[in-house]
Amino acid sequence: MFYLSLFFQYASQYLKTRLTYRADTIIEILSDLLFQAVNLIFIVIVFRHTAFLGGWNRDEIIFIYGFFLVPYAIFSSFFNIWDFNDRYIVKGEMDRILTRPVHSLFQIILERIELESLFGAITGLLVMGYAIMNLDITLAWYDVLIFIVMVIGGAFIYAGIFISIATIGFWSDSRTDIMPMMYNISNYGRYPINIYNKVIQFVLTWILPFAFVGVYPASYFLNREEWYGYAFFTPVMGILFFGIAILLWNAGVKRYRGAGN
Amino acid sequence: MNVIEVQNLRKEFNSYTSRPGLAGAFRDLFTRNYKIHAAVDNISLTVKQGEMVGYIGENGAGKSTTIKMLTGILTPTSGSIIVNGMNPHKQREEFVRTIGVVFGQRSQLWWDIAVQESFRLLKKVYRVSDEDYDRHMGHVIETLEIGPLLDKPVRKLSLGQRMRCELAAALVHNPPLLFLDEPTIGLDVLVKLKIRKFLQEINEQYKTTILLTTHDLTDIEALCERVVLLDEGKIIYDGKLNQLQEHAVEGKQIEFEFLSEVPRSSLPRVENLQWEQKDATTWLGYINGDEQMVSRLISDVVQRNPIKNVRINEISTEEIVRKIYEEGMALT
């Protein structure tokens, strides 16, 4: 309860600041939309040349892409942890975090929220709506609940992977380029998994399970029964990876060496 | 009651040295020369409630490392720490509620938002009730004279204004123990005086225990009865400030300003007395002895030479500390 009310306090403070920089916020939202549009156009162009990709048609792939945008938007609104090493370890901001009576990871999440990224979720819903109309899919009432569970699972997988990578900063103070590389890899999750070779499939399923953010859960809504097993494993993977990340984080905080003054 | 109890505290850092040259860099890839360096080396320390303790030492002496262990930021390598009856690192979240921390070189406030919004967030973080907040912070804001700054964003404040707000922010939850790491760094004299006066007040009013590190020894002279002197991770002095002055520097410095130039030969020669020329007509006499010797020396000099001015200089803490570090001292 306390954490929830603290969250709202930070969020309202964030909105207040954002509203004083209206122009910046609008530009950021627009450039996000533009980025999404470019990705969609890419998919459309690919399907000018072929009707199927690994057995999936154009609208199915658009649906997967739209689905992927929702957990991704939640992740990028609340888990802006990609510059953790620079900002908190090298600059020593972690010192300040650790002198406050709230879990350190939660504080960083609060400080780094970027609520405008949630617009990506709206884009995702619109894209999915468009695909559903073309695909002639009927959804049951409980699909909404399943959708929410899948989205949260996907966001947790994302968060778990990126938090785990951020904790490297506790052990090594040298800069790494893993973060941008990971962003690239994460994009593979929004295309059908079976178009990749076996090794990449395995990695995207069990090691860096970005397939659980896009294609696996989306295949449930597309009635692709051959993937149902994986689809329902999404929340389990989310809890598992997020749990591992928190354990790593707590171990890392004990190792924190601080920045010299 | 002891607020801080530290036994044989030690903190080691692993660092590696790189070998010279390209070949060396290549070898470093495979085997590194690790070196263990103890930043804090077997420190034991107790602080009672209501004390104001000055924690001093050169850069790299281990001051910040100690403070970071006492505040739960760093885990000690060995030794035990009990602060406010808790283990700072193990019970971190519960523990930090009972302390206030100001790092002079690091802001606790949110850069983009108004000072009072920062206070409100902190009030929430520390779960301070409205009544407690109003009663306590009203007083703090008044004494630090930051009322007019409250609706300005932090980035628009001057350093002195910001520091006063930082201090207020550290006191939102009225902690019984306050850690101040270089709180007056870079501030002008007026702001320094204001901050010192404020610290004295809260110490008297709430019996707040204060542990202070600073490079400016006048802070310590103004505030702390007790000083802890640190060198290379070890405590080399722990006691009253005035005793440090008495013990560390033997003798006194007397400054004679003569009416005309005076040669060395016309100054008296006594055992335990050294002369140093400051300028053409001024000599400094360093005498190792008690007041009697001092008066004898003065009368000696005055009888032989016409003088304009005589001054007995108290040696400043700064000089004492410099002397200790230069010559090493066995006081403990």
Image: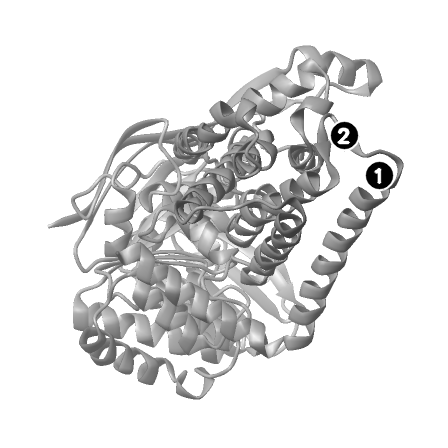
Kind of element beneath mark 2:
strand
The residue drawn where x is 70% and y is 43% is A59
Q: Which residue is mark 2?
A: A53
Q: Chain of mark 2?
A: A
Residue B63 showing in the rendered view:
no
Q: Which residue is mark 1?
A: A46
The local crowd at label 1, few if under 14, some if 14 to 19, many if 20 or more residues have their Cα within 10 Å, is: few
The kind of residue tagged 1 is Val
Residue B162 showing in the rendered view:
yes
The residue drawn where x is 69% and y is 44% is A62
Q: Farthest left residue?
A: B1
Q: Position of residue B19 (x, y in %)?
A: 73, 18
Front one among B150 and A176? A176
Kind of element beneath mark 1:
helix
The kind of residue tagged 2 is Leu
The local crowd at label 2, few if under 14, some if 14 to 19, many if 20 or more residues have their Cα within 10 Å, is: some
Front one among B145 and A188? A188
